[in-house]
Image (cartoon, grey):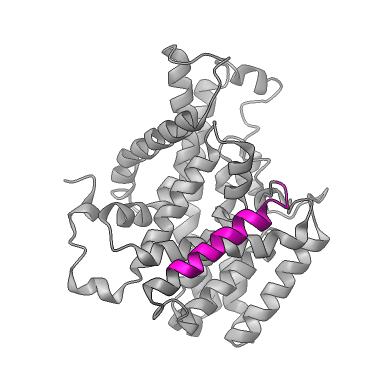
Amino acid sequence: MSFFPSLQRSSLNPSAAARYVFIDNAKAIGIVLIVIGHSKGLSDYMVRLLFSFHVPLFFFISGFLLKPGKLDESVYGNAKKILRTLAWPYFLFFCFAYLYWLATRNIGAKAALSVGRLWYDPVAGLLTGLEPDLYINPPLWFFPCLVATVILYQAARKLLNLTAATCWFVILGFAVTLAVSRPPYRLLLGLDTMWPALSFYAIGQYVRERAWFDNMRAGHLLLAGLIACALLVGVGQLNDRVDLATMYFGAQPLLYLPVSLFGIAAVLCVSKLFPASGIAAWLSENTLVIFPAHFVFLGLVRGAALSLRIIDNNYRYGMGWSVASSALALLLCVPVVYVWRRLPK
């Protein structure tokens, strides 16, 4: 049994032409950026840059991967399918993080953070789906938000055509980012974060249906990618760190959606320029595991380094630590993927 079945596939197999290989590449780039973005050692500027688009990228990709034929099926039937797909990893990786938290909460720096927290306090995060409550594994907020996003989009498409749905959801998402920032009260299970998320999801479906990237030549992709990168870096500097999970869209919320789209466009252009890759395919296939597992493993790597006295509490984290700890966290996901594939779904 191989840990890496994706790496054994030929990138030249006949079915490859029928697949969106560049989306595999984009998902691979995206999940690596998610992991690095949660690691210690990045400069404030790099964190601000990554947070401006790496999670919106996954909402875009989710919309892109929605097969148009699914929209002909019942909303109720599709809702059951998306719940079955996402509820299980949400619950399982919450339990995984919870057991790790119970085992380590009184060790080292975590002891100070756990003062006053009862053993059952983290369960609130499982029930609310809100990132501040999911402090044992913050990336889990993405799962209930994606469920709400998919269900509402598919329900809306029963009434609206592709163009109308895209326009309305972009307008709504834009309005929410302008009107709401770090609200004092939150809606549970992604019912507030889904509005900006819907704009990216709808655009992803629109780009697929209009086949914007299908026939672009390498020269055009390179030029478009360079322009998108320049706009991301240039315009992105005008805003501070944003965070969709906490509904904070920066000091200049007007820029949130455009900057996110610049980052998404840059990743898509780069992804389109690269051929199929076994490593990218493996990362793409297993984002459902890496997304919720990596945060725990980043903490485990740091804890192990402290215990082994490779570093101490005064260690100055830098890019080297960020890259190394992210690579180790991804490697630790390999056996988890192996086990995950053999679990009953």
Pick the residue in front: 203 or 269: 269
Q: Tell me residue 189's x, y (percent).
A: 65, 55
Pick the residue in front: 48 or 173: 48
Left or right: where 97 falls relative to 218: right
Q: Which residue corresponds to the image point at 54% horizontal and 31% vertical from the top-left?
A: 41
Q: Which residue corresponds to the image point at 64% horizontal and 38% vertical from the top-left?
A: 44
Magenta highlight range: 222-240
Q: Quadrant of residue 148?
A: bottom right
As drawn, 155 above or below 242: below
Res. 154 visible in picture: yes
Res. 91 visible in picture: no
Image quadrant for the C terminus? bottom left
Left or right: where 204 falls relative to 259: left
Q: How many marks?
A: 0
Q: In the displayed image of the protein, which residue is found farthest to the top? A: 309
Q: Which residue corresponds to the image point at 42% horizontal and 62% vertical from the top-left?
A: 270
Q: Tell me residue 70's x, y (percent).
A: 46, 79
Q: Tell me residue 99's x, y (percent).
A: 49, 30
Q: Quadrant of residue 101?
A: top right
As drawn, 88 above or below 275: above
Main secondary structure of the magenta stretch: helix
Q: Within the magenta stretch, is there residue 285?
A: no
Q: Within the magenta stretch, is there residue 236?
A: yes
Q: Which residue corresponds to the image point at 18% horizontal and 46% vertical from the top-left?
A: 2
Pick the residue in front: 51 or 104: 51
Q: Tell me residue 43's x, y (percent).
A: 59, 36
As drawn, 18 above or below 125: below
